[in-house]
Image: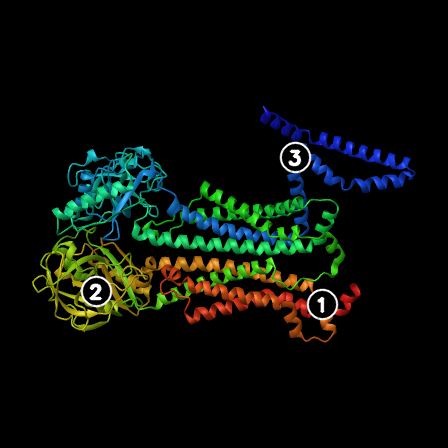
């Protein structure tokens, strides 16, 4: 009952606010009048009596507030008063208010954007039912989650931890809907793929495990909603239509829901096809090869009551069984459970990079709070007389602090709202951005409730941090001393909160500037480092012979004709073939090799995992790869000749302990084939720029299986556009049905360079924001120092002080703080070397150019920020100042 009565009373005070104020005013007036009547009867005049009564009573407003609080505390009324007064104060300083709102908008917007990406790639699960129990598993021995299809079937049949296991792979196919055939990306999914995910079709039906009755038994295709919308114009009669997939008839049986584009978050496919039809789609027998690990991680829902530790133990027991049953294909495996959405070989670097960006964004917000905290502290100092008078008139320190905090909250809410609007626009643009149109890669960063909540939470936290900076000044303020000092008060020489905040802000700026310069320097080195080939003046032409109908020996003959045709183009120096060019879409695939003395070729005895490239005799010259010893391949290195290989230096060091004695020695492949090393080439990059030196081997195409798809490498000094047109014409002369993608090798490396470029852009933007915040902080500090010491500077000038002495007196403190903060930030940047090197290739703050650049940038930053205050200090007129005084 007491709680109900209290609630009723507070509601009554809220809705009867005006009536209570009137009654309170009348009561206070009556009390003062009664006291005045008593004084008048004691002999004072009426005017003196009323004046004496008012003095004895004290501050009426203070008593009104105390009475309000005693009557239940009209919280909302007082809050509205504080907000109204705060708006009036900020309206009188539009420049300060605008700069503060813009500062917080930039800082909170940057945090919201980075958190949106963090939320998309780390925090947000797949948009499927019961996503919390959905796990994929990867094998620790390969560092990726690839499994062969036979292994997947065994895991599915033997595990006791998952309700069911599904799997999938990615492939590019030609989809012919009856109009223009086009290459699209597809998921090759197990029959139970959609059932395990628990999603329902938007239109028609999905394929199921019951549709699988052996190889090529399920010629069905499910379209994504986006592909159905763009290519079939939402035609609901598409279900049942027959289309051609790689020239094989497939029936469209359904359309996936709009929100579902697959189980890889950054990749939007166009269709889903049953994995049992892999032979029709890719022309190989990978489904029957236990050693061919080409699918992504198997995934499924853990059974109720099964822990992750129990699931890992179950998977380990199955791994032990596979090792014993298939010793040549399966080795001892360790397993890790991961959330589906990112394959871990890509997910770990992405997560680390985004987490690093989140840390830097947090530093930007901290710098912004330090900036605004210093500005608020300066404003509180400037308003010291106002605060003193309010205290003298009876206002409580609590009320003054609440008023200052309200002003800070108004700015933070305005800045947070603006930053949120900016971040929402950027995230929506980012979610539809496709950096590689041919790959359908996108960042699923559309904002959701978490992004809104974080932005608003950061706004309130920032407002609180900014508003509490002047607390010490208000609590320690002595109204008598402040009023007595008047306008002659000088800023003290001791270290203040503003000084500490400015040093923190400059240090953070120096870290951000260091990071951005390190990124720029690393990117420049990436573009000019030794890749083990020379991409400049080299063209690539990707040709898919399988899609053009070539098989068996016809593939080998066509490959030779293509190389010969390229070499007849005027200006072409050399042409060659390679299965996958290094640094182009992941480079070559890996295979296992054994030392020549190894007789038991099981996975446990593998000497090393090697990048393998199948090449034609002219590849090395076309690629610009230096031959260090031995010879390259000739046309005689075919299936009838002894098996030979060219290896790089790292291969020779790792397998034979030295690259000087490797020539003529032998090693074995996983199939037992024995290869002789006939040449050694320079080391280079294969998968990405940040990888350590990796072993690689090159095998002649005539010795290996024909390449269903291959890349022509053409070296020429001709204009790339003219050369591309000539190459396309030559290929069409050979076969008008050949589809080819022609680009420069440098352009082909865009995918490998993308992380470094994005890191450089992101760090550069953050460095720029940090520089802006730091410059405004230095400017504010210098301008405030000059404004508070104008009289002192005028006296110095009148006494004959030189220009440098005036500048030293006016800006010396700001310069010292700049030096301390910059040194601290540079040291922190150097300590972060390993993190920066992980983000950007060949990035290190210990680079002399980076160190010099940071020092120069911070010096210029200080000069620009202090220029206007310095000009004001030098132009001081002592006569005018003394006259005003």
- Depth check: give the residue in front, 240 or 149: 149
On screen, residue 319 above or below 883: above
> Compared with residue 43, is residue 95 higher up or lower down, i.e. above or below?
below
Residue 618 visible somewhere in the drawing: no
The residue that disc 3 covers is 73
Q: How many marks?
A: 3
Residue 833 is labelled as none
Q: CA distance from mark 1 to mark 3?
A: 48 Å
Q: Is residue 629 left or right of residue 48?
A: left
Q: Which residue is mark 1?
A: 792
Question: For mark 2, what is the residue?
Answer: 576
Pointer 2 and pointer 1: residues touching (CB < 8 Å)? Answer: no
Q: Quadrant of the N terminus?
A: top right
Residue 641 x/y as whole percent:
8, 64
- Side of 868 relative to 331 (left or right): right
Task: For marks 2 and 1, give the CA distance.
Answer: 79 Å
Q: Position of residue 863 (x, y in %)?
A: 58, 68
Within-10-Å neighbours for mark 3: few <14, some 14–19, many 20+: some
Residue at image position (39%, 55%) is: 353
Marks 3 and 2, how far apart at CA = 85 Å
| Quarter location, residue 300 | top left
Question: Does dot 2 land on a helix, a strand or a loop?
Answer: strand
């Amino acid at each position: 009952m007491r709680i109900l009565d209290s609630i009723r009373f507070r509601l009554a005070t809220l809705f009867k606010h005006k009536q209570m104020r009137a009654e309170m005013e009348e009561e206070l007036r009556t009390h003062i009048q009664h006291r005045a009547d008593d004084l008048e009867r004691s002999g004072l005049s009426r005017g003196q009596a009323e004046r004496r009564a008012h003095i004895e009573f004290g501050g009426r407003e203070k008593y009104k507030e105390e009475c309000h609080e005693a009557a239940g505390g009209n919280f909302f009324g007082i809050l509205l008063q504080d907000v109204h007064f705060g708006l009036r104060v900020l309206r009188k300083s539009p420049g300060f208010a605008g700069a503060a709102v813009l500062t917080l908008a930039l800082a909170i917007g940057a945090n919201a954007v980075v958190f949106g990406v963090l939320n998309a790639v780390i925090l947000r699960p797949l948009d499927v039912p019961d996503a919390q129990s959905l796990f994929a598993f990867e094998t620790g021995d390969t560092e990726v989650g690839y499994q062969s299809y036979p292994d997947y079937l065994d895991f599915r049949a033997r595990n006791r931890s998952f309700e069911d296991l599904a799997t999938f792979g990615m492939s590019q196919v030609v989809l012919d809907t009856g109009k223009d055939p086009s290459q699209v990306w597809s998921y090759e999914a197990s029959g139970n793929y959609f059932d395990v995910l628990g999603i329902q079709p938007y239109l028609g039906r999905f394929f199921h495990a019951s549709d699988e009755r052996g190889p090529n038994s399920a010629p069905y295709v499910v379209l994504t909603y986006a592909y159905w919308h763009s290519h079939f114009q939402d035609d609901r009669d598409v279900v049942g239509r027959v289309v051609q997939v790689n020239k094989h008839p497939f029936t469209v049986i359904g359309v996936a829901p709009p929100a579902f584009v697959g189980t890889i978050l950054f990749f939007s496919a166009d269709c889903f096809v049953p994995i049992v039809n892999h032979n029709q789609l890719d022309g190989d027998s990978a489904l029957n090869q236990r050693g061919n690990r080409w699918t992504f991680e198997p995934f499924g829902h853990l059974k109720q009551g099964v822990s992750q530790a129990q699931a890992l133990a179950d998977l380990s027991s199955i791994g032990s069984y596979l090792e014993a049953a298939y010793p040549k294909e399966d080795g001892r495996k360790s397993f890790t459970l991961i959330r589906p959405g990112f394959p871990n070989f890509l997910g770990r670097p992405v997560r680390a990079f985004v987490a690093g960006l989140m840390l830097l964004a947090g530093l930007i917000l901290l710098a912004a709070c330090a900036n605004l905290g210093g500005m608020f502290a300066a404003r509180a100092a400037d308003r010291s007389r106002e605060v003193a008078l309010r205290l003298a008139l009876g206002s409580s320190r609590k009320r003054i602090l609440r008023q200052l905090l309200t002003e800070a909250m108004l700015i933070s809410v305005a800045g947070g709202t603006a930053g949120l609007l900016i971040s929402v626009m950027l995230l929506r643009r980012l979610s539809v951005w496709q950096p590689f149109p041919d790959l359908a890669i996108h960042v699923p960063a559309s904002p959701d409730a978490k992004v809104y909540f974080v932005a608003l939470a950061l706004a309130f936290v920032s407002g609180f941090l900014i508003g509490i900076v002047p607390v010490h000044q208000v609590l320690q303020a002595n109204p008598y001393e402040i009023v007595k000092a008047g306008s002659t008060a000088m800023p003290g020489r001791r270290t203040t909160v503003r000084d500490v905040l400015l040093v923190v802000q400059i240090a953070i700026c120096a870290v951000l500037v260091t990071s951005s310069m390190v990124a720029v320097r690393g990117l420049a080195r990436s573009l000019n480092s030794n890749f083990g080939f020379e991409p400049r003046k080299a063209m690539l032409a990707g040709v898919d012979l399988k899609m053009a109908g070539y098989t068996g020996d016809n593939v080998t003959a066509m490959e030779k004709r293509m190389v010969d045709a390229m070499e007849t183009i005027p200006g072409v120096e050399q042409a060659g073939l390679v299965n996958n060019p290094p640094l182009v879409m992941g480079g070559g695939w890996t295979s296992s090799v054994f030392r020549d003395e190894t007789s038991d070729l099981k996975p446990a005895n593998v000497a090393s995992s090697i990048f393998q490239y199948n090449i034609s005799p002219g590849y090395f010259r076309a690629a610009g790869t230096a031959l260090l010893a031995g010879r390259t391949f000739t046309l005689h290195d075919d299936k009838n000749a002894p098996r030979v290989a060219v290896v790089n230096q790292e291969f020779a060091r790792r397998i034979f302990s030295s690259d000087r004695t490797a020539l003529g020695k032998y090693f074995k492949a996983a199939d037992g084939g024995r290869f002789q090393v006939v040449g050694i080439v320079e080391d280079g990059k294969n998968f990405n720029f940040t990888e350590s030196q990796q072993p690689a081997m090159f095998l002649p195409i005539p010795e290996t299986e024909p390449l269903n798809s291959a890349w022509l490498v053409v070296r020429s000094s001709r204009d790339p556009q003219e050369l591309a047109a000539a190459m396309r014409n030559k290929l069409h002369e050979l076969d008008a049905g050949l589809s080819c993608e022609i680009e420069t090798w440098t352009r082909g490396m865009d995918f490998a360079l993308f992380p470094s470029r994005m890191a450089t852009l992101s760090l550069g933007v953050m460095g720029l924001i940090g520089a802006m915040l730091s410059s405004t902080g230095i400017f504010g500090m210098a301008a405030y120092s000059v404004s508070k010491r104008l009289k002192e500077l005028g006296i110095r000038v009148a006494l004959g002080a030189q220009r440098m002495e005036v500048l030293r007196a006016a800006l010396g403190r700001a310069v010292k703080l700049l030096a301390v903060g910059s040194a601290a930030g540079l040291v922190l940047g150097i300590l972060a070397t390993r993190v920066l090197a992980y983000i950007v290739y060949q990035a290190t703050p210990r680079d002399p150019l980076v160190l010099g650049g940071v020092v120069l940038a911070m010096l210029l930053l200080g000069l620009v920020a202090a220029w206007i205050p310095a000009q004001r200090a030098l132009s001081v007129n002592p006569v005018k100042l003394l006259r005003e005084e």
